[in-house]
Image (spheres, rainbow, N blue to C red):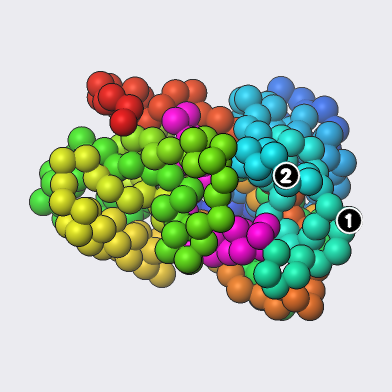
Amino acid sequence: MAITVQPITPDFAAEVGDVVLGRPLAADDLAAIRAAFTRYAVLVFPDQTFTDDSQLDFARHFGPLETTVFKARKDHKLRLHENMADVGNLDAENRILKSDDRQRLYNLGNRLWHTDSSFKRVPAYCSMLHARSIPPIGGQTEFADMRAAYDALPEATKRRIDGLVAEHSIMTSRARLGFSDFDEGEREAFRPVPQVLVRRLQDSGRMSLYIASHAGAIRGMDDAEARRLIDELTAHATQRQFVYSHRWRVNDLVIWDDRCTMHRGMDFDDQRFARDMRRATVSDVAPTCEQMGLAVAAE
């Protein structure tokens, strides 16, 4: 039986059924998933059971896997495989993180609008988040369609932002929450990297905004003006008509295109309810500036 794709909106987000992702996939099924992914940018696969290894094996169909940012902290004890991002609220012994735990405070940054790994020289292509356990209320994830947001911009704004390059760092997003507990190794690993504000998607040819809470300075622009522009673009892109809110079910796998979406995790009582969410993230093919043909020096 061929896979079933049920759009959630005509052009953004779809549910996919009649496929089991935790075992080897037929070439036709993988091609159909890729085609749906190019069109909808967010795909929801209900009732998928994985081991960590089988989730990583599925992710490898899309490209090379990233290593978790927590690997940069030498004194951090990983709960999961180094190729998995641990975005729940559990420590290495599967206990709920205390309110002042560094990992909890760090992960609060996931509640800001962002796109995964835009702070890396080669950013993410896509992310695959699996729900092992979820809180009974709260904890949704919202996704914004940055292609549709770009299309809806006034022509004058499109001309203004064409070719602009922003500096992205995970320290920028965490600073907005007052978090600054980075050691010297992390500060070196997380130095700002250049990313274009507007990019063309190689598979669909569509144009997309590329912004995030990790974005700070814009090259060639006064810092205050840059902050206003990024905030204005973020407010525009996260209007209700561009946003899909996903209410999780246990064993949902959601994959999203980090090149053309932003997302944020919503609040829940993380001192009361356990949330075990495991994400595999696939690297893009090249830095965004290189993809857009811009010769940009690192700073």
**Residue 258 spot, x, y in % from top left:** 50, 43
Question: Who's the residue at 62% across and 41% down the image?
Answer: 69
The residue under label 1 is 93
Packing grade of label 1 (10 A; few <14, some 14-19, many >=20) is few
Nearer the camera: disc 1 or disc 2: 2
Question: Who's the residue at 27% across and 25% down the image?
Answer: 296
Q: What stretch is highlighted in magenta?
A: 102-123
The residue under label 2 is 75
Q: Which of 144 and 296 is in front in this view?
A: 296
Q: Are discs 1 and 2 less than 8 Å apart at CB?
A: no
**Residue 114 spot, x, y in % from top left:** 47, 54
Identified by mark 2, the residue type is: Asp
Question: Who's the residue at 22% across and 40% down the image?
Answer: 219
Identified by mark 1, the residue type is: Glu
Secondary structure beneath label 2: loop
Q: Does label 1 or label 2 sit earlier along the sequence?
A: 2
Q: Can residue 38 be seen in this view?
A: no
Asked if residue 113 is among those painted magenta in the image, a careful observer would answer: yes
Alpha-carbon span between mark 1 and mark 2: 16 Å
Q: Is residue 237 left or right of residue 227?
A: right
Give the answer, above or below, for where 246 lies relative to 296.
Answer: below
